[in-house]
Image (cartoon, rainbow, N blue to C red):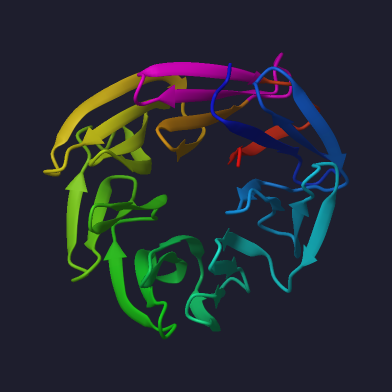
């Protein structure tokens, strides 16, 4: 049952009723549980220093769990967050100001810069390298999705690239940034910003792409294939190599190192609180953890590594 060298964290919450449960486990069998007097916690986030945060898309606060794991520290904010990102030298918040505009709030310690940029709603996710911040922005009133590329050196946008639909992931593959969308991978050259589009090997009527990771010069993409998980492999010549179809219901998924984690939410009437399935790419093996039942549905999970 040892999934990885680390701790899995889960949050169970209800949109309106107070009482959210924070559970953590090192082995998938024994869980520690703490109840927090909060509602509407839909996401967990873990930063570079293994801090875990409780996030809500509607609340005017976010919460940091203490290192002991038995209490929370509230951080009040003027508007709800769309995402947060904290690395050693870069902090970025997406702020949901109103239905027309979102604010990108950046604190860049490497370049000694602190700034805000207003964008049309909605800012969904980001990634970064030494030179640029890559930001996914759904311009809802124009029904289009773009990737905005912002120079870290001067805090100004240098390029806007329109993509086919909402980016569900932004990852790096060789010298490119990859925006994962429902039906395409958009490869953006980090030097020229030229774009190459690659469609999936499965019919778009079957499902959609979701997350991606680069391992040993190959790009692995998780695909929601008629409600089940498929893992697609792209080789270094940008050709599809193979498809692995797994008997796992597609839920909330994320790649961590060489493993793909999928959280399946169960109805409250079922015997368990949910299931976390882990597919190991290198071993071609699936492990599952059944989560303890609570009177709330499980919403999200993160894995923190042992230092």
Q: Position of residue 123 (x, y in %)?
A: 50, 65
Q: Position of residue 108 (x, y in %)?
A: 52, 75
As drawn, 127 above or below 34: below
What is the residue that sits farthest to the front in this orientation? 307
Q: Which residues are magenta?
A: 266-290
The image quarter containing residue 133 is bottom left
The image quarter containing residue 116 is bottom right
261 sits left or right of 150 in the view: right
How many marks can you see? 0
* Viewer-proximal residue among 47 and 161: 47
Tell me the quadrant of the picture where the N terminus can be found.
top right
Q: Position of residue 89 (x, y in %)?
A: 53, 68
138 sits left or right of 192 in the view: right
Residue 133 located within the stretch drawn in magenta = no
Which residue corresponds to the image point at 28% horizontal and 69% vertical from the top-left?
Answer: 161
As drawn, 189 above or below 217: below
| Residue 167 shows in the view | yes
Which residue corresponds to the image point at 41% horizontal and 86% vertical from the top-left?
Answer: 154
| Residue 203 shows in the view | no
Which residue corresponds to the image point at 57% horizontal and 54% vertical from the top-left?
Answer: 48
Tell me the quadrant of the picture where the C terminus can be found.
top right
Q: Position of residue 53 (x, y in %)?
A: 69, 52
As drawn, 73 above or below 183: below
Residue 273 located within the stretch drawn in magenta = yes
What is the residue that sits farthest to the top in this orientation? 271
């Amino acid at each position: 049952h040892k999934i990885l060298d680390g701790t899995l964290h889960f949050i169970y919450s209800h949109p309106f009723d107070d009482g959210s449960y924070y559970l953590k486990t090192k082995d998938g069998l024994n869980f520690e549980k703490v109840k927090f007097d909060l509602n509407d916690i839909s996401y967990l986030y873990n930063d570079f220093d293994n801090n875990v945060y409780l996030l809500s898309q509607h609340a005017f606060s976010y919460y940091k769990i203490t290192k002991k794991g038995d209490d929370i520290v509230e951080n009040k904010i003027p508007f709800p967050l769309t995402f947060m990102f904290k690395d050693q030298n870069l902090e970025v918040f997406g702020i949901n100001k109103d239905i027309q505009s979102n604010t990108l709030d950046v604190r860049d310690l490497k370049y000694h810069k602190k700034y805000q940029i207003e964008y049309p709603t909605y800012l969904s996710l980001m990634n970064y390298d030494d030179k640029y911040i890559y930001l996914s922005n759904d311009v809802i009133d124009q029904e289009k999705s773009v990737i905005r590329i912002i120079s870290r050196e001067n805090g100004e946008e240098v390029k806007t690239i329109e993509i086919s639909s909402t980016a569900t992931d932004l990852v790096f593959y060789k010298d490119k940034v990859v925006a994962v969308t429902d039906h395409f991978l958009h490869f953006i050259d980090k030097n020229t910003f030229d774009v190459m589009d690659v469609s999936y090997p499965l019919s778009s009527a079957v499902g959609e792409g979701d997350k991606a990771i680069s391992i040993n010069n190959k790009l692995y993409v998780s695909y929601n294939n008629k409600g089940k998980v498929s893992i697609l492999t792209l080789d270094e010549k940008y050709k599809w190599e193979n498809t692995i179809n797994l008997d796992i219901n597609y839920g909330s998924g994320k790649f961590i190192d060489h493993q793909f984690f999928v959280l399946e939410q169960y109805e409250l009437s079922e015997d368990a609180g949910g299931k976390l399935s882990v597919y190991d790419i290198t071993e071609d093996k699936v492990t599952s953890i059944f989560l303890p039942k609570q009177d709330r549905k499980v919403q999200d999970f993160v894995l923190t590594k042992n230092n």
